[in-house]
Image: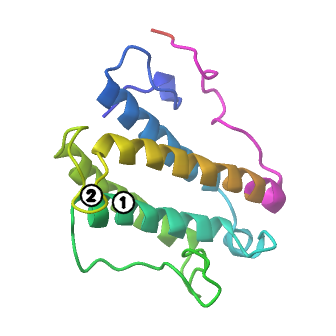
Amino acid sequence: MSELLGGGLMPRRGLGERDMLLAYLERQRELVFWKCEGLAEELARSVATPSGMTVSGVVQHLENVERSWWRQHFAGQEGLSFDWTDDRGDAGMTVPEGVTLVQLLARYRAEIALCDEVIAAHDLDDVSATRNHSLRWILLHLIEEIGRHLGHLDVLREQADGVVGEEPEGAPPPGVDEA
């Protein structure tokens, strides 16, 4: 999809609008996977904010968000299943017992592939089947939404095992384009 710098996650300058938006969406998604890498299962579920948000819950929420925006609202697909709320109204942040972080990440990766098919089939100015949003608007919204939850993952991961950082080790700093 996009050319990322030397194994890093920074999109190259000079891409057209569509490619740049897709590259930033890919960057946000890949940072979610990187932020979860190597986290012990018990920590993915047990370290939480006072409201109960966990790393596992954030990943499940992001899977639901992408499914909702891309496949349900934009493409108009019906009959999709969601883990949105429990009795606390937690937007799908409560993960059922027995569902592991590895499983959640695999489900999220599979959902991304389905959503990318929808994105690839449309132009930036195409309008969603519901809610009257352009593909461009939803791309920008999802970049922002995933970015917000990356901040949650930053805090949860640091609390869980002390791992910190904004980029994988060895990635060029933001704004650096080696080409």
Q: Is residue 169 above or below residue 30?
A: above
The residue sitting at the front extreme is 132
Q: State the image coordinates of residue 27 (x, y, percent, origin top left).
A: 49, 38
Q: Which label is found at residue 74? A: 2
Q: Between disc 1 and disc 2, whose residue precedes?
A: 1
Residue 100 drawn in magenta: no
User: Looking at the image, which residue sits at the far left?
Assistant: 121
Q: Say whether residue 162 is magenta.
A: yes
Q: Which residue is found at the position 65% from the left and 56% from the top?
A: 38
Residue 147 visible from this viewpoint: yes
In the image, is 111 to the left or to the right of 35?
A: left
Image quadrant in which you'd find residue 48: bottom right
Label 1 vs label 2: CA separation?
A: 6 Å
Residues at marks 1 and 2 touching, judged by CB atoms closer than 8 Å = yes
Q: Main secondary structure of the magenta part?
A: loop
Task: Answer with left or right where residue 19 lies relative to residue 59.
Answer: left
Residue at the spot 60% in from the left edge and 71% down from the top edge: 57
Secondary element type, mark 1:
helix
- Residue nearest the observer in this picture, 73 or 179: 73
Q: Nearer the viewer, residue 24 or 170?
A: 24
In the rendered image of this protein, does residue 97 appear above or below residue 169?
below
Give the residues drawn in magenta, as a range. Answer: 157-177
From where the camera sits, is residue 37 visible? no
Callout 2 amino acid = Phe
